[in-house]
Image: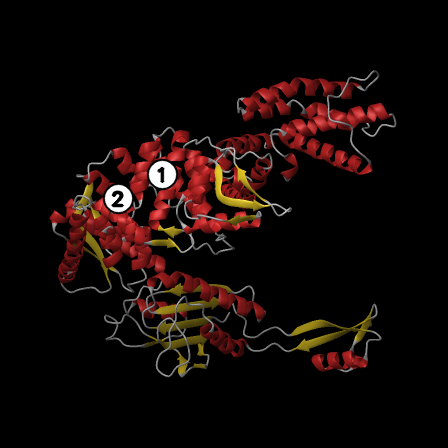
Amino acid sequence: MPQLLLELFSEEIPARMQGNAARDLERMARERLAEAGFADSAIRTFAGPRRLTLVVDGLPAAQADRSEELKGPKAGAPPQAMEGFLRKVGLTQEQLVERDGVWFATVSSKGKGTADLIAPMVDQIVRNFPWPKSMKWGTCTLKWVRPLQRILCLFDGTVVPLDIEGIKSGDLSEGHRFMGAERGAFSVRDFDTYRAGLASRYVVLEADERKRRILDGARAACAARGLELVEDEGLLEEVSGLAEWPVPILGDMDPSFLDLPPEVIRTSMRTHQKYFAVRDPKAGRLAPHFLVVANIEASDGGAALAAGNARVLSARLNDARFFWDEDNKPGNFDRWLGKLKGVTFHAKLGTMADRVERIAALASEIAPLVGADPAVAEMAARLAKADLASGMVGEFPELQGLMGGYYARAAKLDNVVADAIHDHYRPQGPNDVVPSASVSVSVALADKLDTLVSFFAIDEKPTGSRDPYALRRAALGAIRIILENGVRAPLDRLLSAALAAALESESPLAAERFAEHLSAEGYTSTGREGSLMADLLRRGISDGWDRTRSSGSQETEFFDGQRLLELESYCRTLFPPLKAFFADRLKVQLRDEGKRHDLVDAVFALGDDDLVRIVARVEALDKFLATEDGANLLAGYKRAANILRSEEKKGPLPEAGRALRLPGAPAQEITLVAALTDATPKVETALAAEDFAAAMTALAALRKPVDAFFEDVMVNSSVPAERDNRLRLLIQVRDLMGRVADFSQISR
């Protein structure tokens, strides 16, 4: 069948945009082909440094003829409605069909030739392409990522004529900018001749093939000298979009630079030069070499290229050495902390120094919960952000935290403090490690909780795909820290401590948000604002705030000393969305581990906010429901709950209590009473010990008695005493199971 081949040839496309551009080209083509009736077409797209390519196989020569039935006005509708409908469909009323009091028109249209549809389709795609950034050039009004130079557009080997801002389509393409220049442009008939022509002119079309060539060549170059490539998937993705004909070259650098931290060397190579680092497997450290990917085959094997890149790298590493030496001078931590007072974290949350105070106070509160020394945790938290003012982090922001750890060791601070500074941003993604040392856990958790509580407090919550402050990542990081370290602290307690730390600080959050809350509660300010919350929480009195009574008199309110007593209603508005946010992130975490999200809902519905205990319940519940007993008992629970709901509509249910063994009761009823009597203490004991597997085992013993009860016993007996007793039995079943999880939240 005919083939569509489209190439959009331009100046260099940024590597970071190429992958999405290929996906966008496929999506836009698929949508427009589907609109034309070609939904089953096989589409391939390719992206490289200078071209976007689209290949569509299996297109017919023309659209099929189409017939469509359109619904018109009702019979008896005003004449104007019928006239409008007839104009729309281009028919007479005699050509309409009346069915069930409504007029219908059948409109037939002859299918267009596919070639006639391609030109407007390509024009729409080019003019509406969603580049993150685009530009205009010359007198052209078209926007494209870089100046568009050529359009190759063929259908069934024939040029599809189109003209976009003076750029006319043709059947020509060209190869490598330098190595392919001698052979010039070449004519194309189809995708096979296109790909072959590019290959013979030093262009590798497929991004995956460019990556494979880079990796294979780099590994071979390193292996020839007894070295190993430090592989970097992100860098590989980027350099594969920089070279049409990638040629890996191994270069040498001055060994004296290996005195710098390896992260500094790698970051300098990666960020500025797009070089891969090289490891000496025998020494177990970086080797004084680098791997650069050239876009040309040099006649000298790349020696001159390697030497030139080595000189550039030396200049970069000399800059890094300067920063390293300057940043390790005595007294820098105090100087850096002073600088943070002039760095705005957020207009509504104060300076970075304010944030440091919040994190330090919170880390001190969390420390006892994880077995850390509060004073050490507070000290580490106070120093954790200092390196943001250092020269090295100013040059390489991605090294924040990590450099602080190096500087802390150089300053002879305790290794525990240095480790906490080094690790406090972790985990930064699903594959990153989680801090495990108690002080590190305190600081890392404090950092993430402060981020979450502070931004929620100023109503900067994530919406849809928008999350400018990375709150989802912060929540997932906090969850992983809590779960992987077994932190046994209710979420309410952690969030309250974070809010208290925020409100005790001198940041705008303390003055503005607390003032908003008290104003809404009927308070007026008669005194200080900046240090008010600190006074309230430390002394337990409402110094400076009066509540106006309805009688017109004023009376100073006193507190009982609890830290957040006067913020109770504020917390009621702030914490539910925060806890729901944590629940959603926990679902994501557990779903990635293969757990069902409805099980998380079933456990969260109990009001438990100990994440470690929640996960243990979810895991036990998941295993239980996978058994035959669990599945059948769930069905029994839902049946009991449905009966109770139905009966409750008729009138009040009997008061909860133990069902009795009534004289003459069916054996199945007596058996269920006995089973509940036996299971209840076992479930209670297991729950108290947090042995949720044992609790599920105890519930499993109810399966057969519940099944038999529903099969042979009429709940809605005509005898009131029997009916009430049987409803109590169902209430007991529901409530006992409800102590383990809210089974009503679980889908079958």
Characterize the local packing of mark 2: few (<14), some (14-19) or many (20 or more) Cα atoms within 10 angstroms.
many
Q: 47 or 506: which is nearer to us?
A: 506
Q: Secondary structure at mark 2?
A: helix
Instruction: Give the x, y percent position of residue 225.
Output: 16, 47
From where the camera sits, is residue 609 visible?
A: yes
Q: Residue beneath label 2, please?
A: 404
Q: Are dots 2 and 1 in contact, CB under 8 Å?
A: no
Amino acid under label 2?
A: Gly
Spot the residue most to the right: 718
Instruction: Give the x, y percent position of residue 113.
Output: 56, 78
Q: 679 or 158: which is nearer to us?
A: 679
**Is 254 placed above or below 719 here?**
below
Q: Give the residue displayed 46% in from the left and 48% down from the top.
A: 527
Characterize the local packing of mark 1: few (<14), some (14-19) or many (20 or more) Cα atoms within 10 angstroms.
many
Instruction: Give the x, y percent position of residue 644.
Output: 75, 33
Q: Residue beneath label 1, please?
A: 443
Residue 99 occupies which quadrant of the picture? bottom right
Q: Would residue 456 appear left or right of 414 to someone viewing this image?
A: right
Q: Give the residue displayed 28% in from the left and 36% down from the top.
A: 417
Instruction: Give the x, y percent position of residue 446.
Output: 39, 40
